[in-house]
Image (cartoon, coloured by chain):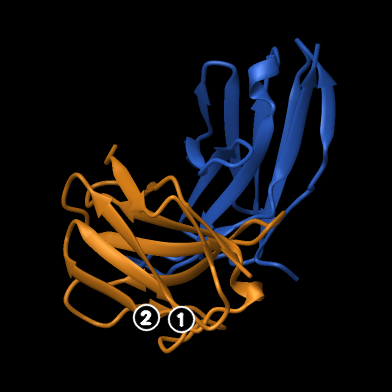
Chain colours: A orange, B blue
Amino acid sequence: SAVISQKPSRDICQRGTSLTIQCQVDSQVTMMFWYRQQPGQSLTLIATANQGSEATYESGFVIDKFPISRPNLTFSTLTVSNMSPEDSSIYLCSVKEPTAYEQYFGPGTRLTVT
Amino acid sequence: RKEVEQDPGPFNVPEGATVAFNCTYSNSASQSFFWYRQDCRKEPKLLMSVYSSGNEDGRFTAQLNRASQYISLLIRDSKLSDSATYLCVVNSGSSGTYKYIFGTGTRLKVLA
């Protein structure tokens, strides 16, 4: 399976600021996804990052709050904008390889907003 | 009703026991199904995909019942290292699309 890295692994940010999380894959993948996992909860899909076009957001998530870029088939970024303490969460990227149904996850970014 | 439902547990079982988890899903058009394992403060890791015919991987057996819209995971001869949260995942996207819905997870604790 693909090897996925995320940067930063963790951060503590002040409310009102923004943080950009990077996701890098060691091979070309057709689909990349961004998830949020709030404390004690399961994963919620934020959006599908589409290469060369705008991301597809799930209900409850908007581009102004979570802008996503995907400039090529191995890299994507998620920005958490104008943060509040409610944004404290783990953010995970995942990928699906072209010939598989399964998705694989990066190690996650643990965000704390104070 | 949630799209994917699991009993949150925790399931506390002794070493060597057999334990089974069930998961129900609401979208009958769902195409593919998976079990993931998540250890504390780690990312989810794929345990196994679930096929219509059922599949087995060592001590783990997964089954799919499309008519009743549930999937199951059976763990035989539990080990201490099996302690984790088990996540049921359903791809509820329509044909050719991918929208993975996660259950809330079932916590397993294997006791010495």
Circle 2 Cα neighbour tier, 10 Å, few/some/many (<14 / 14–19 / ≥20): some
Chain letter of disc 2 in the image: A
- Measured from the top left, where is residue B27 in percent x and y? 59, 67
- Measured from the top left, where is residue B15 in percent x and y? 77, 12
Q: Residue at the spot x=51%, y=66% of the render?
A: B29
On screen, residue A18 versus residue B14, left or right, reads left
Quarter of the figure that contains the N terminus of chain B: bottom right
Which residue is farthest bottom? A64
- Judging by the rendered image, the residue that carries numbered circle 1 is A81
- Marks 2/1 in contact by CB < 8 Å: the verdict is yes
Q: Residue at the spot x=27%, y=41% of the render?
A: A2
Q: Residue at the spot x=19%, y=44% of the render?
A: A26
Quarter of the figure that contains the C terminus of chain B: top right
Q: Residue A14 occupies which quadrant of the picture?
A: bottom right
- Judging by the rendered image, the residue that carries numbered circle 2 is A67
On screen, residue B86 versus residue A48, left or right, reads right
Circle 1 Cα neighbour tier, 10 Å, few/some/many (<14 / 14–19 / ≥20): some
Q: CA distance from mark 2 to mark 1?
A: 8 Å
Chain letter of disc 1 in the image: A
Q: Amino acid at mark 1?
A: Ser
